[in-house]
Amino acid sequence: MSMIQCISPVDGSVYAERPALTLDAAKAVVDRARKAQKSWAKRPLDERVQLVMKGVARLNEMVDEVVPELAWMMGRPVRYGGEFKGFNERSNYVANVAAEALAPINIESSAAFTRRIEREPHGVVFVIAPWNYPYMTAINTVAPALMAGNTVIIKHAAQTLLVGERMVRAFVEAGVPDDVFQNVFLDHQTSEQLIAAGSFNFINFTGSVAGGRAVERAAAGTFTGMGLELGGKDPGYVMEDADLDAAVDTLMDGATYNSGQCCCGIERIYVHESLYDAFVEKSVAWVSNYKLGNPLDTETTLGPMANARFARTVREQVADAVAKGAKALVDPKLFPQDDGGAYLMPQVLVDVDHSMEFMREETFGPAVGIMKVKSDAEALGLMNDCKYGLTVSLWTKDEERASRLGAGLETGTVFMNRCDYLDPALVWTGVKETGRGGSLSVLGFHNLTRPKSYHLKKA
């Protein structure tokens, strides 16, 4: 029997381990989910929504258990209180729009015809969730999928091994039937075998580009619908009329919060030449104020990265950029806790360009590159010079200018004067190698259901 382990970034110990299901045991889970789905879907929508929200409330009651577990599993400091704010915001929003999103579209109701389009659940939804925001990313699909009448099987990354277990426990204790929402521990091979067998009606995967490709390859020929949120290299652009202090505060937080391990974290910034020097000076001072240390210490503001190999990628990208002419501006003497392993100091690089891997490939760590630009046209070209496209952060007082630039940006979301945020009323989507599909908003419900048309001719 193979074991799946979570190696804690706090001290390198095995924090949790669970046996991986055999293929036969995993198939039995799917069978139970499929058998439970029809009766679950027949329940009134209001009842499904209420049960899901009771599950959300029950998880909130587990805060004292969940928050330190996250610190142990992936390094986020306990002072930030877990992910409950975003988790609750997203759950509440989809609950409020569920009836609207799933309502039939009535085309005709006359003496001659009734014509309408209804939304039906796909069936069994497989959620493969990541470790960086394991509760928030999971709830993006779990809540609307269950509300829409699907059953859900969740598999979390090994780095946050216990999250799916905690979520399912909370929802079942709140009254969601056992087989409607199930957690599984699977190795990659078993996951791929299940997908290749057409076990699921919809798959939502959040993770790396390589992981997304593996899911697509496994599903080839099964015609299984899927949503993929993959890599990112999100840019910010600070224009000459921007609020400088607000831009520094927000963009540096967006670049380094959660040790930079954010899907929509800021990884590259383009600043108009008139503000460049001041922006760089203020940014270095902002980042230098972090306290790197044990995430279980309430004084710690920057914890370790989730795994030493993730930190190694950041160090390698920074070293390569410096070797090619970039300058690292944050003083290492301010961060003696940087141990060459999972504990990694933040960094700001200047004199960077797009020949450097650091400005092209996903870094996913607390390091950001800043470039000087002269015009919107130059900034637009640089922002689009990327194989990813999740979000862009524009800093200006001119909404029309931001909208005009936004029309030319190859991205899923255009922000003005904010970043690193997921608005549950707007569809969360990406372009290019960031993936396809979309979650949350009314459109998220549409992705988790299929349309059925009724054309009824009356006698």
Image (spheres, rainbow, N blue to C red):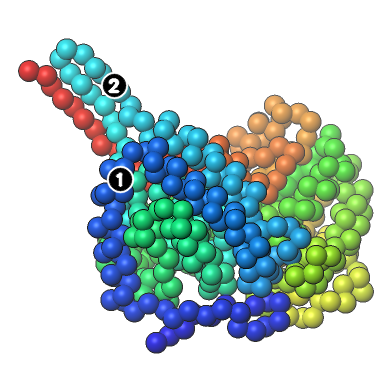
* Residue pictured at 85% horizontal, 37% vertical: 243
> Gap in Å between the C-alphas at discs 1 and 2?
24 Å
Q: Residue at x 26, y 37 (%)?
A: 452
Q: Is 457 situated above or below 68?
A: above
Q: Is residue 247 left or right of residue 182?
A: right
Labels 1 and 2: the sequence-earlier one: 1
Residue 148 horizontal side relative to residue 242, left or right: left
Residue 283 visible in the picture: yes
Residue 265 placement, left or right of 297 = left
Residue 295 x, y percent position in the rendering: 75, 69
Local secondary structure at mark 1: helix
Q: Which residue is mark 2?
A: 107
Asked whether 193 or 378 is in front, the reply is 193
Extreme-left residue of the structure: 459
Image coords of residue 323 (percent x, y): 79, 74
Quadrant assignment for the C terminus: top left
The residue under label 1 is 41
The percent coordinates of residue 265 (x first, y second) are: 68, 55
Dividing the picture into quarters, in which one does residue 314 lie? bottom right
Above or below residue 422? Residue 329 is: below
Taking depth in this image into account, of 42 and 61 the one nearest to the observer is 61
For the point 49% across and 46% down, the residue is 53
So how many labels did they put on this image?
Answer: 2
What's under tag 2, amino acid-wise? Answer: Ile
